[in-house]
Image (tube, grey):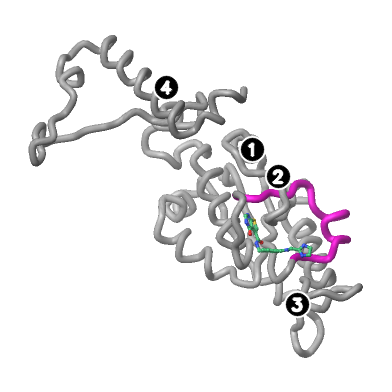
């Protein structure tokens, strides 16, 4: 039985993703055959004797860039050996911001190849010809794109059937309706004098749903007014 989704990661530090995959629900999904994850080191596609992956930018400036040759070789190798229709995604600080909408779109694909940014970036010719989509995980600066690839894997995999225990939790999550989540409580009823709101013990499901919705609106208005304006 083929996996619902195959994700290949191309990075200079693929081991960064390995522990995360192994120790999470993602690893269990792989064992159950729902998902295939391939971790690859870009350095394995270098052909020079020093296995050089970076070089200085033409025109000068600080830092180094990923060289095009090993990246082209790696991506073309994966496309030809696995799936020529795979979507190639470059994780970079100047990409399209990752959102739940983007996550859902990517979860529809059969095969993703995630290329992590390194150094000061990558030769523009890679971006112009090999990459289908460029994605950033937010407006802050990382040292490389590998953790961003792990974040993307984590978010996308929640949409693979069978990966989440309860399919319900997908529906209820924040961002699906552009609202933050409501406050939640478990036992004990009284913890250090702090009591659970009585409405939650009333057994009146309609009133509870109403209260939760109100709490969502209040929290969203206070913390994330930007979410209420947009679609
Ligand atoms: C950080 C790469 C800064 C490049 C032209 C000349 C992947 C990331 C990354 C990194 C620069 C993501 C420049 C949110 C991130 C990532 C490493 C600077 C400036 N342009 N999402 N110099 N934040 N970061 N390049 O940092 O690879 S997804």
Is residue 187 or residue 13 the one in the foreground? 187
Does the magenta-highlighted stretch encompass residue 39?
no
**Helix, strand or loop at disc 3?**
loop
Quadrant showing the N terminus: top right
Dot 4 or dot 2: first in sequence order is: 2
Find out if the beta carbon at label 1 lies less than 8 Å from the nearest ligand 1 atom.
no
Dot 1 or dot 2: first in sequence order is: 2
How far apart marks 4 and 2 lie (CA) works out to 27 Å
How far apart marks 1 and 3 lie (CA) works out to 30 Å
The image quadrant in which ligand 1 is located: bottom right
Dot 4 or dot 3: first in sequence order is: 3
Query: Would residue 92 appear left or right of 159 to someone viewing this image?
Result: right
How far apart marks 4 and 3 lie (CA) works out to 49 Å
Callouts 1 and 4 close, C-beta under 8 Å: no
Image quadrant where residue 96 sits: top right
Q: Residue 174 in the image: state x and y as whole percent.
A: 45, 32
Which residues are drawn in magenta?
Answer: 121-137
Who's the residue at 45% across and 42% down the image? 163
* Label of residue 96 in the image: 2
**Helix, strand or loop at disc 1?**
helix
Name, please, the residue furthest toward the right.
59
Decide: few, some or many residues near mark 4? Use Cα within 10 Å; few <14, some 14-19, many ≥20.
Answer: some
């Amino acid at each position: 039985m083929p996996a619902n989704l195959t994700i290949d990661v191309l990075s200079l530090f693929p081991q960064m993703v390995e522990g995360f995959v192994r120790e999470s629900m993602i690893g269990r999904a792989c064992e159950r055959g729902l998902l295939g994850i391939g971790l690859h080191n870009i350095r394995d596609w270098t052909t020079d004797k020093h296995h050089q992956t970076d070089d200085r930018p033409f025109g000068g400036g600080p830092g180094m860039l990923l060289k095009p040759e090993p990246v082209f070789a790696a991506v073309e190798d994966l496309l030809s050996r696995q799936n020529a229709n795979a979507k190639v995604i470059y994780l970079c600080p100047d990409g399209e911001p990752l959102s739940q909408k983007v996550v859902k779109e990517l979860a529809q694909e059969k095969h993703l190849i995630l290329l992590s940014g390194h150094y000061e970036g990558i030769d523009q010719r890679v971006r112009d010809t090999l990459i289908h989509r460029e994605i950033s995980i937010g407006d802050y600066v990382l040292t490389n794109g590998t953790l961003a690839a792990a974040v993307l894997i984590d978010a996308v995999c929640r949409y693979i059937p069978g990966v989440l225990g309860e399919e319900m939790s997908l529906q209820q999550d924040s961002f699906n309706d552009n609202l933050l989540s409501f406050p939640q409580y478990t036992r004990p009823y009284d913890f250090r004098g702090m009591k659970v709101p009585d409405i939650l013990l009333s057994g009146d499901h309609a009133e509870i749903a109403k209260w939760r919705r109100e709490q969502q609106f209040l929290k969203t208005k206070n913390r994330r007014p930007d979410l209420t304006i947009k679609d």
